[in-house]
Amino acid sequence: MTEPLEPLLLRIAEALERLAPPAKPPLDVMAADAFVWHASGVLEPIPDVNRVDIGLLQGIERQKDILQDNTLRFARGLPANNALLWGARGCGKSSLVKAVHAAVNATLGGTPGPLALVEIHREDIPSLPALLSVLRPASRRFILFCDDLSFDGQDAAYKSLKAVLEGGVEGRPDNVLFYATSNRRHLMPRDMIENERSTAINPSEAVEEKVSLSDRFGLWLGFHNADQPTYFAMIEGYVRRYGLDIDPETLRKEAVEWSVTRGARSGRVAWQYIQDLAGRLGKRLD
């Protein structure tokens, strides 16, 4: 005897529902002050951001003032620019973005703060339009942050970013600003630009297509290796902040030796030395 069709179809439908992935939870843009965006469509809240106090960032006073002013204007609903922080590694580019975000929220008050920081990884740049569709209707304001942004070879993801920053039909939402850090001023290596110039039918147009991405950033803030007095100021600021007991002469001698072994003087090198010093003194950096 043939089984009735309706119960059979019902069992098939129930089996398919069990195989289907669970529905994604709704995205809550007020869940935290900082988030990480994943290309799968997940906006992950970050309750404890890895950052340093803005007062500890030495040797970048001009960059600090410009970025903080730009960010504060944006948080207050006034016109502001996308920002590209470029230059030598370890000079505090990403630390400054995170510190400025915290400082602006502290100035304006509120829990959560009126300004959210959303980090997007370099490899997830093609998913930016999906992220903007989530953020566009929100009443909150957002800084999108991509650390160590650069493009190589035949990578075409930069075209997605160009459209998001200024081009495209919809354009960038009024409640979104984009900050990026890079070791390269034009976000791509010089040999890649020169290769475009030598192989293209119209060299100037080919190069213009590549380097015009950086022109979408209204602010270009350059960072360079610190001189020795600035390096010492970084070290001494950390020593005072964390109450590390060491005499000034020994501190400077060790700091110089540490920078020589690393081949650079920068905020990152200074922090690495402080971590080593605190460990030897049995102190926690809380």
Image: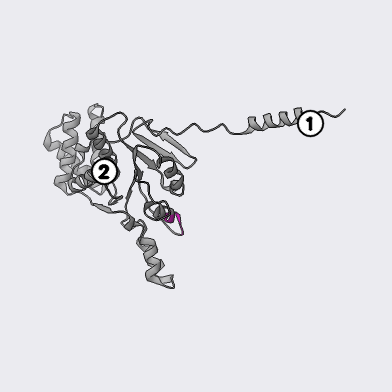
Q: Is residue 188 left or right of residue 275?
A: right
The magenta stretch is 154-159
At which x and y percent is residue 224? 23, 52
Residue nearest the observer in this picture, 69 or 188: 69
**Amino acid found under the numbered disc labelled 2:** Thr
Residue found at the far bottom of this picture:
201
Quadrant for the N terminus in the image: top right
Q: Is residue 265 left or right of residue 25?
A: left
When the figure is inspected, residue 202 is found, relative to residue 6, above or below; the finding is: below
Quadrant in which residue 196 is drawn: bottom left
- Residue pictured at 36% horizontal, 30% vertical: 47
Q: Mark 1 highlights which residue?
A: 5
Question: Can residue 4 be seen by looking at this rendering?
Answer: yes
Decide: marks 1, 2 in contact (CB < 8 A)?
A: no
CA–CA distance in space, label 1 to label 2: 63 Å
Element under label 2?
Answer: helix
Q: Is residue 227 left or right of residue 88?
A: left
**Amino acid found under the numbered disc labelled 1:** Leu
| Dot placed on the residue nearer the N-terminal end, 1 or 2 | 1
At which x and y percent is residue 212? 35, 60
Instruction: Kindly report which numbered mark, 1 or 2, lies closer to the viewer in this rendering.
Output: 1
Q: Mark 2 highlights which residue?
A: 71
